[in-house]
Image: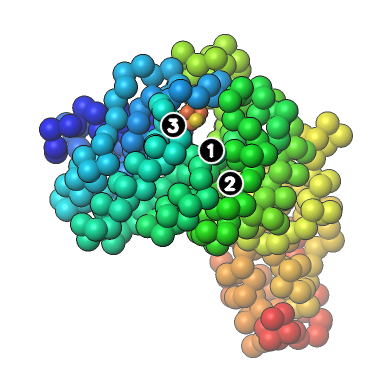
Amino acid sequence: MTGCGEKLTKLTSGSQYDICMPGECLQMLTSGACITYNQNAGGCNRMLKVLLHGSCSYDCAYCPVRADRSGLAFAPRELAETFLGLYRKNLVGGLFLTSGIPYDTDDVMGELIESARILRTEGYAGYLHLKILPGARREDICEAARFADRISLNVETTGESRLRVLSGIKDYASDIIKRLGWIADAAPGHHTTQLVIGAAGETDKEIFNCVTALYERMLPSRIYYSSFKALPKTRLASRESTHPWRSRRWYQMDYLIREYGFNKTELLPLLDDHGTLRNDDPKTLLARNREPVDPNSASFTDLLHVPGIGTVTAHAIIRARERRTIRTPRDLGVSGACLKRALPYLAFSGSARQVTLAGFR
Ligand code: SF4
């Protein structure tokens, strides 16, 4: 450990509200120092998430960094050396670097980029995720994208009026959406964003419209969801926290949109008359309104609509039916929990015509 263990502990703890993966797991790095890391995020195993600055002059109503008056911060070289010390001891495998904004945005952005530049100059070739600050300059976004494997700017909420509930400083159109467009240009396929669910009272219908528009126009590699938590010393401390099931359901919705390409028209009925998502698996809800499909003749897309069947299983079924007619669950060539979930939505006619994998490309 370096001599700045306490600072590292506090600045890693302050970064935990930026999400790098669904259900991420924060653990102690060593028994002596309370350093948290993300076990699997970014594919790098044990990613260190840390703030460059632990305080912020912005006014986001849910954010504990805003309330921090300690002024704890790393200088870029100090951060780089601290991280490299841990990396060389094999205690961490990648870095997620974010920051509060205690003074001018351009200056803090410059420090984030300088930290990344030092790391790369020192020979660090591992995973690096840099946070882009709201209102960042285009040239800084391009520079960050040059050093980082991934960059991200949190969209936070669904629109200008909702953002007003959270912040009197950030401008939704200019500081966030315009910058997301620049990020999409600078790092195509290598950027993410995050929504805080429930902080500004946004409905699931608003979230749905926001998420589908982001995937259509900004092409993020993925969107992360965190249920709003009413934290002590924040302006929303007395508000009720959003139940974690809501972000879980949004990860499931997101998967249907991002991975399976389910369209807006078929997903919209999952929202009730008040624009609220039900606390149930969205794919199962959709399947309950569809006829069971014959695995011998179902299209790849139809198979994807069956609960328990994802892309790997759908391909396995199509390969199985190229060999023989599927008359029983055993003929599907798959087993386990996914098969149990799928069976109520499959109809084994055994007489349908064979369809080849090539037909679905
Ligand atoms: S910009 Fe807002 S969310 Fe980000 S650290 Fe500052 S107060 Fe927190």
Residue corresponding to mark 3: 104
Q: Is ligand 1 closer than 8 angstroms to the Cβ of mark 1? A: yes
Q: Position of residue 224 (x, y in %)?
A: 55, 44
Query: In the drawing, does residue 150 fall left or right of residue 242?
Result: left
Q: Earlier in the sequence, mark 3 or mark 2?
A: 3
Q: Secondary structure at mark 2?
A: helix
Residue corresponding to mark 2: 179
Q: CA–CA distance between discs 3 and 2?
A: 17 Å
Q: Could you say which is closer to the camera, residue 313 or residue 62? A: 62
Label 1: how many residues lie within 10 Å, few (<14), some (14-19) or many (20+)? many
Relative to 161, residue 269 above or below:
below
Q: Secondary structure at mark 3?
A: loop
Nearest to viewer (mark 3 / mark 1): 3
Residue corresponding to mark 1: 134
Label 3: how many residues lie within 10 Å, few (<14), some (14-19) or many (20+)? few
Query: In the drawing, does residue 173 fall left or right of residue 123?
Result: right
